[in-house]
Amino acid sequence: MATRLIDRPAADEHAPYYEKYVARVPDGDLISVLREQAEQTTALLRGVAPERENFAYAPEKWSIKEVLGHIIDTERVMTYRALRISRADTTPLASFDEKVFVANSNFARRTLADLVEEFQVVRAATVHLAKHLDPEMLTRRGTASGNPVTVRALLYIVAGHERHHTQLVRERYLSQ
């Protein structure tokens, strides 16, 4: 299948909260951005020394492993929403509380290498879903967390959310 441009979503295609993530995604081919992110994030996290895997830069902040787990969980939730909406399911989709998700995970007991592998698998599934959505599917609208959202906006949110958190990892976790 030939790569095609997935247009940047308009402001009315997602809740205002998500603009900070959408704005982080560079112009161009979103599928390539998602693939390149997987490679870059994998390389970044494989370079983390074992003694830093559980590091948190401040009290009550997540560890590097928990941040990666949060990225994975969020990607799963957003792509689940994208799948449902792309298939013309008009059922309003519930919110999720990322703090509850992380608090009730076992990320801290897992190895960073295992979480990196899971991230790669989840991202590969995201890429496969995204590259097979046609223009009509990408612009379908649904409701998530009480707000209107399009499929393409959800894919941009995935990319921007990952970019946001990997920047924080570089700045707050790996520079100290």
Image (cartoon, rainbow, N blue to C red):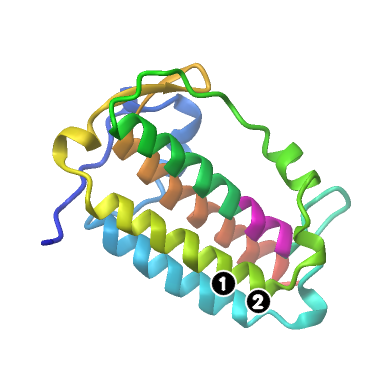
- Residue drawn at (58%, 53%), measured in percent from left and top? 71
Task: Please indicate whether residue 26 sits to the left or right of residue 59 in the image.
Answer: left
- Residue drawn at (77%, 81%), measured in percent from left and top? 50
Q: Nearer the viewer, residue 43 or 143?
A: 143
Main SS, magenta residues: helix
- Residue drawn at (62%, 31%), measured in percent from left and top? 96
**Residue furthest right as drawn:** 59
Query: Are the residues flagged by discs 2 and 1 in contact, CB closer than 8 Å?
Result: yes
Q: Which residues are magenta?
A: 65-70
One can see residue 56 in this view? no
The amino acid beneath tag 1 is Glu
> Measured from the top left, where is residue 144 in percent x and y?
47, 24
Q: Residues within 10 Å of mark 1 (few under 14, many from 20)?
A: few
- Residue 150, by quadrant, is top left
> Measured from the top left, where is residue 60 in percent x and y?
86, 48
Marks 2 and 1, how far apart at CA: 6 Å
Instruction: Determine whether the residue tagged by mark 2 lies in a helix, strand or loop.
Output: helix
> Measured from the top left, where is residue 59 in percent x and y?
88, 52
Q: Nearer the viewer, residue 38 or 123?
A: 123
Q: Is residue 173 above or below residue 139?
A: below
